[in-house]
Image (cartoon, grey):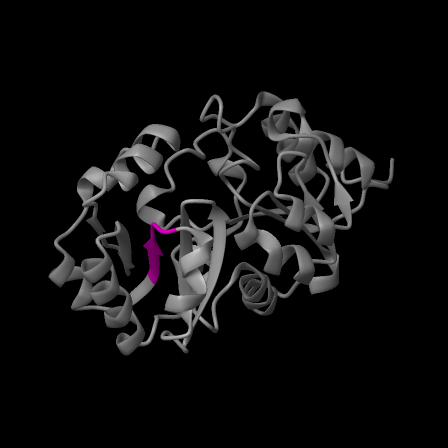
Amino acid sequence: MENTKQKYALFFDIDGTLVSFRTHEIPQSTVRALEQAKANGSEVYIATGRPPLIITNLGAIEHLIDGFITTNGALCYVGNELVCCKPIPKDDVMTCVRDSREKGYSLIVVGHGKVAVLDPTGDVDRIFRQYLNVKELDKASPLDEVLGGDVLQLTPFFPASYEADLMVRMPGCTSGRWHPEFTDITAATADKGKGIMDLARFRGFDPSRTIAFGDGGNDLSMILQAGIGIAMENATDGLKKHADYITSSVDDDGILNALRHFNVI
């Protein structure tokens, strides 16, 4: 019998989209849905703000993944092949590092394979280790060691009200906020939407035949870039406003329901 299901390149954010904030796991309905999508000819890609060091919660689907957009598009790869690497201009990196020291806020500095953590306020521990269940930041490297190489992402912990004040002093960068207490800063040439285009060129698929799933502000670029942009019910209002479709939440079979709706499974 001919397969009448639709084939897409599927892009998934991790936190709040694939992985539940409540259980820190991928729902079984999502695992089954992705297995069926792959069996029907679709491809599965991860699109996350996490650097590779802390992508440790995808074990249930790792055998299904065709490629990665990590660090909000600053580092993309397929297997062992590097698709793109887009470092932040050094002057902008140091502007942020100096500002964090002067203002006393916490900062995560992401290099190529290494991460440094400045946590004078305890915000990194409270949000990343406790709320997001990220244990791997215990493997953090010294700041000077990370600053000695390319820096791909800066994650400062301050409210949105201060963001514009800093970003105007970092002209080579863009900011994608997915949590009220911190934002992810990357080079202006890097975001999840651009990551989709980088992978499309590398893998040879049509960007119009893509579906992107997300829940936070740093997912907006891929929701707008993808052929179909889907927001989870637990997504921010700003993301929902721009989505082509709103599915149920991560804990209520959201990915399964959306893939059925678009005849992927």
Image coords of residue 263 (percent x, y): 82, 39
Say which quadrant the C terminus sits in.
top right
Indicate whether 43 appears above or below 125.
below
Tally of numbered discs: 0
Q: Is residue 171 above or below residue 228?
A: below
Per the rendered image, the range of residues in magenta is: 153-158
Is 229 displayed left or right of 5 in the figure? left
Question: Residue 16 or 33: which is nearer the viewer?
Answer: 16
Asked whether residue 206 is in view, the answer is no
Q: Residue at x 74, y 36 (%)?
A: 258
Judged left or right of residue 167, residue 4 is: right
At horizontal 73% and vertical 39% (from top left) the residue drawn is: 40
Compared to residue 79, the image places residue 252 above or below, namely above
Q: Please name the residue shown 24% across and 58% down the image.
A: 103
- The picture quadrant where one finds residue 129 is top left
Q: Position of residue 204 (x, y in %)?
A: 63, 66
Question: Residue 116, position in %: x, y?
Answer: 21, 52
33 vs 169, nearest the viewer: 169
Residue 142 horizontal/vertical position (percent): 12, 54
Q: Is residue 14 left or right of residue 43?
A: left
The majority secondary structure of the magenta stretch comes to: strand
Viewer-closest of 256 and 155? 155
Q: Quadrant of the N terminus?
A: top right
Is residue 146 found inside the magenta-colored segment of the image?
Answer: no
* Whether residue 230 is visible: yes
Eyeballing the image, is 261 above or below 68?
above
Q: Nearer the viewer, residue 103 or 138?
A: 103
